[in-house]
Image: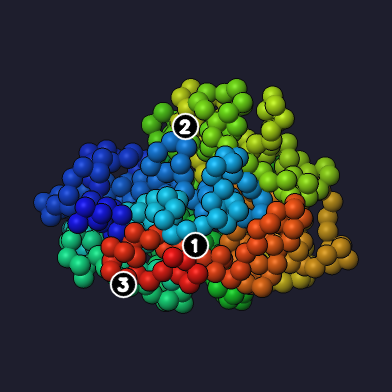
Amino acid sequence: MKNLNITLLIAAILSITSCKKDFLEIPPPSQLNSDAFYNTESDLLQALSAAYAAQRGIYTGKTSGLPPLLQLEDVRSDDYANGNTNDDVMDLFHVDGGSEWYRWNWIDSYYAINAANTVIDRATKITMDDVLKSRIVSEAKFIRAQIYFLLNQDYGGVPLVLNETISFESDKINVPRSSIADTYKQIEADLIDAASNLPKIYTGSDIGRATWGAAKGLLGKVYLQEGKKAEAAAALNEVVSSGLYALLPDYKDVFAPDNHNNKESLFEIQHLANFAGSTYGNNMATPNWGGVGAGQNYDLPAQSFLSDFEPGDLRMVGLTKTDPIGKIYSVKYLDPNMSTGFQGNTNFPVLRYADVLLLLAEALGESSQSYDYINLVRDRAGLPDISQASPGTFIDKVYKERRYELSFELNRWHDILRLGDTKAIELMNNNFIRYGMPNRIDAHDLLHAIPVTVVQVTNGIVKQNAGYP
């Protein structure tokens, strides 16, 4: 039983409670679930705080400098390279199911899912204002859906655990994988329900919680990933026509550490310097950057990314910096006022309006309206408008815009997957050929490996993806 901390759900077995009231607080994972605790509105809000904190852990990681999602999403794509030459597991697809990145990501994800499930299950037993209860449960469903969306894209269908795990009994923790379609069905249901109960805006200390726009925008993104273009367009158009969101005039301001939850933001991972700070500034910096804390060389722009930048693109100024020895790195999440390493005050954008505009253009297909949405994004970047007459296919033009507008936001790999297996493999292998690299990928590389320890400890109930040990 000593390896249970790395199984499917044991990492999530501890529910997190706290006496803190701010939903940004990180409650200590030191207490088992207690029926005596979940009795009041305050208790439920504290449990929801734990779910948000657990969601943040997926992005930031449990330890400084080691956020698994950066490796699983960005370094795996053609845009970014791991600056640590001994850490090319993801960059060059030298992959095995025992990689620490898979294991940590799986553990963190199911930990967060269990925190959300705790809120959803326990809410039914608490007497409180029904409107607030519905909102709290909907926030938890948004978190659960968002995490399952990442898992479903990265691993294929995964074990769908929809209730709080409080038992070590094998039938509670050894849950077989659901199909990709069934996992998407659950994600859709959670987001539809969340959108029907979440407010459009918050005020005061509640700003930053999941909103109607976050749920509706993510639902559109989910539909598009499934290939349901009409449904995606309908959901995304609701966000655009709501008038709640707009592009900020200056690209750099979108990510500024003093500009959290701005007009362009649908949902951000909330960070607070020196308490629940962001590690991204350090993760993306080189050791020679000259700032606070050690640069980690994670997720540096790849040569193809830098070479393909369109001349005059203002996002290059807001995105990159060159260190004293000539290495280029991202400053997108750099907090210039950071006083402690790995404790930046910069939020992470899970979904923002520029993403919605480009997703909507893709969902609608080539049309004057689609180019209008694309050109809104290009105009801010200081680039000329494009049209059907511009070189390249429509999808090439959309994806190029997404590549630079949404760089370092964990989108590129999932965009590549949306091209379909044949085109995704061709794109990645052509990139390897372009830079004289011997690596080649095939269809099995499009999904990550299930952590070997999960397969082993569940006695094979959780099946490994094809092509992995």
Q: Within 10 angstroms of label 3, few (less than 14), some, or many (20 or more) residues?
A: some
Residue 435 position in % (x across, y down)? 75, 51
Q: CA distance from mark 3 to mark 2?
A: 38 Å
Q: Nearer the viewer, mark 3 or mark 2?
A: 3
Rendered view: 316 above or below 218: above
For marks 2 and 1 on the same chain, the one whose residue lies earlier in the sequence: 2
Asked if the residue at tag 2 contacts the one at tag 3, i.e. Cβ–Cβ closer than 8 Å, the answer is no
Q: Nearer the viewer, mark 2 or mark 1?
A: 1
Name the quarter where the C terminus is drawn: bottom left
Q: What residue sits right under mark 1 in the picture? A: 448
Q: CA distance from mark 2 to mark 1?
A: 27 Å
Residue 84 position in % (x across, y down)? 57, 39
Rendered view: 288 above or below 154: above
The single residue placed furthest to the left in the displayed view is 36
Residue 325 position in % (x across, y down)? 70, 26
Asked if the residue at tag 3 contacts the one at tag 1, i.e. Cβ–Cβ closer than 8 Å, the answer is no
- The secondary structure type at the circle numbered 2 is loop
Q: Amino acid at mark 1?
A: His
Q: What residue sits right under mark 3 in the picture? A: 461
Q: Is residue 182 or residue 345 the one in the foreground?
A: 182
Q: Residue at x 35, y 48 (%)?
A: 54
Q: Quadrant of residue 63 in the image?
A: top left
- Residue 342's tag is 2
Q: CA distance from mark 1 to mark 3?
A: 18 Å
Q: Is residue 37 left or right of residue 200?
A: left
Q: Residue at x 31, y 47 (%)?
A: 50
Residue 130 position in % (x across, y down)? 27, 60
Name the quarter where the N terminus is drawn: bottom left
Q: Amino acid at mark 2?
A: Phe
Q: Amino acid at mark 3?
A: Ile
Q: Residue at x 72, y 42 (%)?
A: 315
